[in-house]
Image (tube, rainbow, N blue to C red):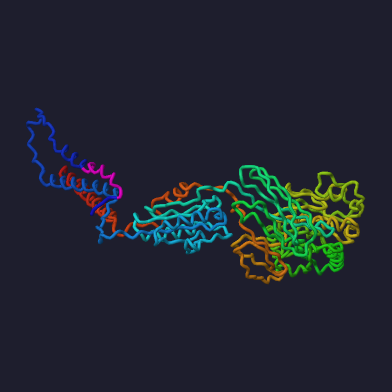
Amino acid sequence: MLTFLHPAFLWFAPLALVPVILHLLSRIAPLSLRFPTTRFLHNSPMPLQGRRRWQDILLMLVRTALIAVIVLLIAQPCWKNPPTSLMPEKEGCIAILDVSPSMYACVDELRDETTKLPADTTFITTENQPTSPNDWIIGFTAPAPSKALENAAKYLEAFPRSARTLHIFSDLQSSNWSEEMPNMPEGTNIIVHTNADKVMTNWSVVSTRCEYIGDNKLRILATCRNWSEIAETRTVELSLDGKAYRRELSLAPNSSAPALFIVPIPSDSHAEISILPEDKFPFDDTKAFWASPPPPHPVLAVFSSEAEKITEELEFFTIPALLSEPDDTPQRYTANTLDISGLPYAELSSQSVVFLLGAADRLGDDAAEILHEYVAEGGVLISVPGASPLAGWRFLQKTGLAPRGTATLEKHPTGIGALKPSDELHTLFPEKNPSDLHLFNIKKHIRISAIDDSDNVLLKTIEGDPALIRRYVGKGQILLFTFGLDTLSSDFPLTKSFLPLLRELLSQALDSRTEIISIVCGDSIPELKTLDGTAEQFPLDTSEPGLDKWANRLVEINVPLQESTIRYRQPDEITRALSENSTTQFAKADDNIRPLSAFCAAALVVLLLLESLMSFGGRKIQKQQAN
């Protein structure tokens, strides 16, 4: 049976009569008039009109057929075979079950609705795993449903247009259904099942942080968030060492605030923060974390073995300053040493800080590139001039690790100038503090004509020249001393201010970093490497939140934060997003419908060629008759 995909265009079929009308109009004989001056002329023989009349008729028919084929091609004719059986067509029905944590509030309600689906319904989860309603278990990951929808579309394309049904069982949380979704095959009936009563209030534990404050005590900050549109007050409970500590916390709508706890260092560092009373999103009301001083940061000190005296002094003063801690205080740093020749072969991503101690003048292009990449990825680099301070500084400028201003070496004695209240280090060395920061002698230093606007000068000399510069490169930062930390360059390592300044710089640079590995449920632990590049692999199940240890690393596995939001999408939005385009990469015509567009296109080409040949032949005959 012949049918059309766009039958409305058949109304333009009468346009095929235009060549016939033009041919009939051309047959009207013109009125002849006789002039007296032509009576003495002989009559010319009449041309043979019969043959040309048949050519005109044939050309008219070709042009009529040409217009008719164009109209048919636009209407897209198809041949539909009659059904071979009177049995009803098999129906394709597939259901997607949302297994994200936010479904805790409605999984039981929606599970009952799955019993109303046909017995041959195929069930898959938003993690794209086959399942059944009885095995519908909510997890702790936040899977995006796009892959499951894509496979559902591939499944439904095998069924006729009128027998495709997609069921979606979800709370339609915006954080999960915000990605671009693939369209369903043409004719798919999309039915969205969602919970009747949406959860409109929710609190969650966003993060925890532990700090050692001395006297064998910890400061624990538990940041909580109120995701709802109303202000509420809840109780925040810290469970530690078999004891419970509680704080009342009031939060405005869509706001966060920390709950503060001061506790003794526990014998068991497994801790838990909970929000009471528990709400309908219970998965984010409790968070397990390590309540212990953070593991020490690994620090790499890079020296140059060619400058023996300076190297010995830098190692003598710097390494003890990094490792020195008061009694009964957790170690904050571990130190490794490396000669500059081994820098191109070291894995710097395993280090929190790299000290370039008097070795900048010995850098090669490979080592400089490694340092630049290390800082750009979030590392901290501290550079101290060595035996050839000017050469080292210019090499750092060449690689983009130092400001671009003109650099000269000043050998006249100077000192550190006064700090202003607006300076970052003013709180460490206030005017009332009897510090010797301004009393030591700087014997030589690098003088910079100008620095970039984005760079911060932390210390200046008495003359106002930069003495310590903080420079940001990519995600990391560089601290550049313009004077050396050896006795040939300055007396700074011999002062009481040396240790506090060095530790404060490290503390500020590493303020947001911790050696505790924090990952989201379902993610794999990142590959960790040692200084020599050896990779460490540790098989760990991250499907559920909790705590674990990996060598000397502490691991925290958390529920995805985006699951805590209580923003939702409407069912008609999802339906519209899945059916915006009637045809997709998965859609195809039914087996009993065969398009005839190819035949129409071939006929169109033949008629165009025939019309061109006949028009050319007619013009040639007219030219011969005229001659």
In this rendering, is residue 229 above or below 81?
Answer: above
- Which range is magenta? 5-16
Q: How many marks do you count on the picture?
A: 0
Question: What secondary structure characterizes most of the magenta part?
Answer: helix
In this rendering, is residue 507 above or below 40?
Answer: below
| Point 18% across, 42% down: residue | 20
- Residue 76: in magenta span: no
* 191 or 485, nearer to the observer: 191
| Point 9% across, 31% down: residue | 38
| Point 41% across, 50% down: residue | 581
Residue 255, position in %: x, y?
A: 66, 45
Is residue 253 toward the left or the right of residue 504 in the image? left
Residue 231, position in %: x, y?
A: 65, 42
* 257 or 313, nearer to the observer: 257
The reply to whether residue 256 is visible in this rendering is yes
* 475 or 250, nearer to the observer: 250
